[in-house]
Image (cartoon, rainbow, N blue to C red):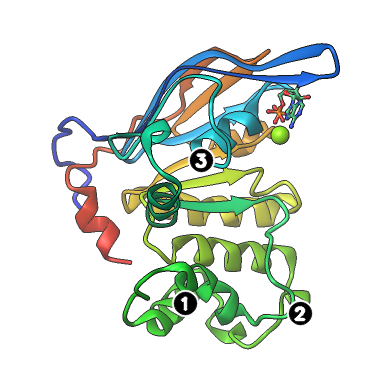
Amino acid sequence: MNELQPTVDREIVASIVGVSKVYKLGGHTVRALDNVSIDFRQGDFVAIMGSSGSGKSTLLNLLGCLDRPDSGQYILAGRDVAAMDDETLSRIRGRYLGFIFQSYNLIQQLSVVENIEVPLSYQRPPLPGGRERCLKLAELVGLSGRLGHRPTELSGGQQQRVAIARALVNNPHVILADEPTGNLDTATSHEIMDLLDALNRAGRTIVMVTHENDIAERARRIVRLRDGRIDTISEVRPALPVVSGSIALERL
Ligand SMILES: Nc1ncnc2c1ncn2[C@@H]1O[C@H](COP(=O)(O)OP(=O)(O)O)[C@@H](O)[C@H]1O
Ligand SMILES: [Mg+2]
């Protein structure tokens, strides 16, 4: 991709507008998110930081449609999530979003390639060429030599690579990652960040929660939350000058 092409307006892939989320515990209410507004554009790479309890996971869960706001709007792929029925929501989630977790969340009984295939089994009708696609993704994350291994036979970094390949299998526009390097040593963490960086350069939008400064600095923007509100937004590197990211996305 030619990174010197002029930037045209990058498409907004996800937009949070005046969103609040309140939890009630006994007689006590916690405002986990308090009137938060933020846009995520195609090619963004955002690190969400903030102390424990500041609302990071709540924000990521809303972005992932794992939870719904109490007030405000979430616009995903140009559509109001609140107006989607369950079937539409799960279809958009499956096609549009890829998830990466701190604890990898692999299925222990399945091999590397079978784990990567899991999201394909939810597609109706199944995507053609699924197995070949999984093999290509295993190669992309450097696991071609481990296709038949079970998760317990892999290092933490290798398990996270499987999880990343699995997150990519439906060619999502947006990758959501909650502490993706939280269980990894520094060197392995940076290898995983190299992979996320390459995916971002190929046009994917990444929103990642982390509490580690050196990991956050691998993103393009850092959003700091405090008590459920956006405290600061800082730019680490300029936004990716994506022009037609969909072409780059289809390369995978
Ligand atoms: N399911 C829940 N029930 C009650 N309170 C919750 C729930 N989830 C989160 N909270 C509260 O909301 C606030 C934000 O939580 P969270 O988004 O998990 O923070 P972070 O990920 O930044 O540590 C915290 O005060 C937390 O205790
Ligand atoms: Mg959290």
User: Going 58% across and 36% down the picture, which residue do you hit?
Assistant: 67
Badge 2 amino acid = Glu
Badge 1 amino acid = Glu
Q: Are marks 1 and 2 in contact (CB under 8 Å)?
A: no
Instruction: Identify the mark at residue 65; answer none if there is no mark.
Output: 3
**What residue would you read off at disc 1?**
139
Q: Any atom of ligand 2 within 8 Å of the CB at mark 2?
A: no
Q: Any atom of ligand 2 within 8 Å of the CB at mark 1?
A: no
**What SS does tag 2 mark?**
helix
Does label 2 or label 3 sit earlier along the sequence?
3
Q: Residues within 10 Å of mark 2 (few under 14, many from 20)?
A: some
Badge 3 amino acid = Cys
Where 161 sits versus 235, above or below? below
Count of marks overlaid on the render: 3
User: Going 37% across and 61% down the picture, which residue do you hit?
Assistant: 171
Q: Residues within 10 Å of mark 1 (few under 14, many from 20)?
A: some
**What SS does tag 1 mark?**
helix
Q: Nearer the viewer, residue 130 or 80?
A: 80
**What residue would you read off at disc 2?**
153
